[in-house]
Image (tube, grey):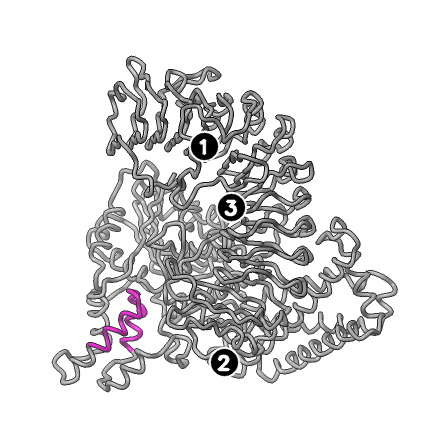
Amino acid sequence: MAAKLQGRAYLSSFVDAVLNKLSSLDVNSTPEAKRLADQKLFRRLRASLRATRPVLDDAEQKQIRDQEVNKWLVDLQDALYMADDLLDELSTKAATATPTPTQRDPGNSSSWSHYVDSILEDSDDDEMGVVTSMQDIVDKLESIVEEKDDLDLKQGVAKDLEDMSWRIQSSLIESSDIYGRNDDKETIIKFLLDDTCDDNLSVISIEGIGGIGKTTLAQLVYNDARVKKKFAIKAWVCVATKFDPVNVTKAIMEDIASSPCNMVNLNSIQTELKEKLTEKTFLVVLDDVWDNQQNLWDNFLKPFLSGNKGSKILLTTRTRNVDSVMSTTNRHYKLDILSDEDCWSLFLKHSSISTSSREYVILEQIGKKIVEKCKGLPLAVKTLGGLLRNKDNVEDWENIRESKIWELSEDESKIVPALRVSYHYLPSHLKRCFVYCSLYPEDYQFDKEELIWLWMAEDFVQTIESYTLENIGRAYFDELVARSFFQPSSENASLFVMHDLMHDLATFFAEKFYFRVSELGDPQKICSKTRHLSYMVNPRDPILRLGEACKGAIHMRTFLDVRFPHQPDGLIKLESDFWLLQLQTRCLRVLSFKCFPIESLPVSIDKLIHLHYLDLSHTPILTLPESLCKLYNLQTLKLRCCQKLEMLPSRMQDLVNLRHLDIEDDFQLKEMPKGMSELKHLNYLSNYIVGKHVDNGIRGLGTLDNLHGSLCISKLQNVKDSGEALEAKMGNKKHIIILDLKWLPNNDDDDDDYDMDDDGEDDGDDDDCGGGGGGDIVDVEKEREILEKLEPHRKLKELSIFSYRGETFPDWLGLPCYSNMTKLSFYFCKNCRQVPSLGQLPSLQHLLIWGVDGLERIGGEFYNNAESSHQGTPFRSLQTLVFRDMPCWREWHIPDGFDGFLKLKSLSIEDCPVLSGDLPAHLPALEELTIGTAIRSSFMVNHY
């Protein structure tokens, strides 16, 4: 799944995508279509697109220094957007022209062909408008194709999209040019001198973002006296972006032999190299390794396996997983940025400014702000210092401080050449994904899955047979992380950020097609070429200017609301007539209105026929129109925390392409609409609210086996019997790793108000022992049978059970075969008289038992499962154990010689007023013990 390293131009994948859509329309599939004169439009469109592809790499290389080429690419991209919009419109209308949703299969091209034929034959005004639009687009593309010759754009240029002369090609280095790397140097040398590895060959990688100094550090180590003494043979080769086993092996041979290698056959070269290395302790440095194709490396490494124990390969790379394909015995060293002090010293050296000069005091203040912009990247520091070499004019320094990378001239554009090289050699589809992130503000923390859903909505994710779009998108994301374009947030490990310089890079290549309203100034700058727009709420500017901003973006595809965590809500004033100028921006793929004061959608929402992604999370929306279900292309519908929304549209089943439905924390939703089982592409469903009828009951889950991630099934009290529960087929949902099962006790059929309030507390008043679930009469045996039939698959990691109404739990709950289970929670299971047998779950780390009113004794059944043939150490992995709000719990039996809880770090027993006796005597890992009455307002369920 890893993307191949191939530096295709940014627009290459876009051209390919439009050509694929053109082919999928299959307009030439009937004899009648072939006879239509207007079919020439499609042939001309295809010919124009094909004519642009060969010169895109050359154009992308030249655009930085040639504004005419840059304009040519901008015009081409604008035309591609228009063609893409028109083809999407044709295919969507063709698909929705069929009478039933089940016939609207995305792969059914016959209906598309028939529809397109009818358009081209028909002469009414609407369809003639389509033909006219196509004519305009084709004319524009043909004009663009003609210009490529005038611009001297070449076909089939090499992939060297950047002058590589800036790279240091030798192992020599001036030690006086090194600042702040002594500790790094000593660590790498320690790795190189270590002979404890049993294998003859081990691999050490120095990893980090481009320009951080990986090559410099490797050079420093390579020339150290201790390293020279250790290794009998040393060789250095710069691999760069194109890994050619023949050329790299020849380069190593030449470095070892200090003479040219004239052989051209890989086998012959490797044979001679093997002879050189046999029974020798060697060090080979492979500088700037990018390629991670296993088959290439397997063959390349053969001669290196003949060396002595302790032989090493040291490589530098921007891609974290490169060394994993070279050796199972490897060490990764992540190179950090330079300190501010070291950066300033390096800057002073390269700027050659005398600290005794008259202007130094002023220049120092400006210079340190310039250095801050480098974010610890030594290459950026050296380049900026070089720009100001021997310049003591304050104005020159001010100009550099105020400049942006994307505004620099040709000479100045090499401020971060490594970053530009990294970008240029991205595959085309990854370039589009990366540039899309220019919509985020600087330092914005983004969620991996959410970004992938956005990429999918924009058609950036290419289909690959046997892989889901989500998994392909994750591979894209992971590749960008491995190449240091994204990095984990230091504040929240589950989120990601872009380094500021990477953000600048994305913004530079975004051109006119991307715009951030609040950061990039005057909305009047938005023009018809703007396709992707984000708006960040500014607390100092509470008046929303979206109506003004959107007037120019008549072809807008993206309206994305972004906000930083903890940013205050309620700052937005929405014009009553806003709604994107009454939905005239019909090209929208992404529409996000998180936290906007929206109470309803217009019925005309169905005009947004291209819409793939709609986010109304955290809005006070009351209803959703039925017309929403006409959005044939909708993939993602986010309604998280819409706490006033009571019903979903009844025709949700018509959203045949829906993949993600997020209704988490929508407490007022009463039930699922009928027919959810027909949503065969559904990949994520946060919550399934069981209805009381056949067509929206729990059996609706039966066919949804493609669900991934987490799933909550609520209102399980509406399940009539175990037969219905069995039809949910929970064992087939093998991609669900977190499962919540909720019985919400209602005092009457219409009372849906029981839930946890903001502090995680039960709003009910039923605190008596054996209080039951509300006032309902419950068949506890039937409830146990229902839970028995909801047995999930064996790879589940987390499970919570809320307000279960049986007296005992089924045996599957504690079976050791649930070897991946790390977290279990039981809330308000008020009828239960016995805890489940959980002690033999081998990976269980966190256990919470809260509000089990009927429980009086915990005995031996807690530690060992009678159904398990092998009984090991009880709770061998448990780290956190919480008992809470158990008014009748009197005894905790600890067996004689009990040897469990060996890893327990935290034990909490709160609001258990009648418990007496001793605690477990042997808790060797215990760090925290809490016994007493909980401060109820500070304890939240979701902490567990």
Residue 73 can be seen in this image: no
**Disc 2 marks which residue?**
525
Dot placed on the residue nearer the N-terminal end, 3 or 2: 2
SS at mark 2 in the image: helix
434 is within the stretch colored magenta: no
Asked if one can make out residue 661 in the rendered structure from this viewpoint, the answer is yes
Is 866 above or below relative to 428?
Answer: above
Name the residue rendered at 72%, 76% in the picture. 133
Q: What secondary structure is marked by label 1?
A: loop
Give the residue displayed 19% in from the left and 69% down from the top. Answer: 345
In the picture of the structure, the residue carrying the numbered disc 3 is 667
What residue appears at the point 26 percent right and 51 percent down from the top-left corner? 188
Occupied quadrant, residue 611 = bottom right
Dot placed on the residue nearer the N-terminal end, 2 or 1: 2
Number of other residues with Cα within 10 Å of mark 1, as a class: few under 14, some 14 to 19, many 20 or more:
some
Residues drawn in magenta: 365-386
Mark 3 vs mark 1: which is more N-terminal?
Answer: 3
Viewed as shown, does residue 622 lie left or right of 24? left
Residue 122 appears left or right of 495? right
**Which mark, by number, is residue 820?**
1
User: Looking at this view, is 872 or 618 the one in front?
Assistant: 618
Which secondary structure lies at badge 3? loop
Residue 818 x %, y %: 47, 28
Q: Residue 882 appears at what percent x and percent y?
A: 34, 31
Asked if the residue at tag 1 contacts the one at tag 3, i.e. Cβ–Cβ closer than 8 Å, the answer is: no
Q: Main secondary structure of the magenta part?
A: helix
Left or right of 285? Residue 465 is right
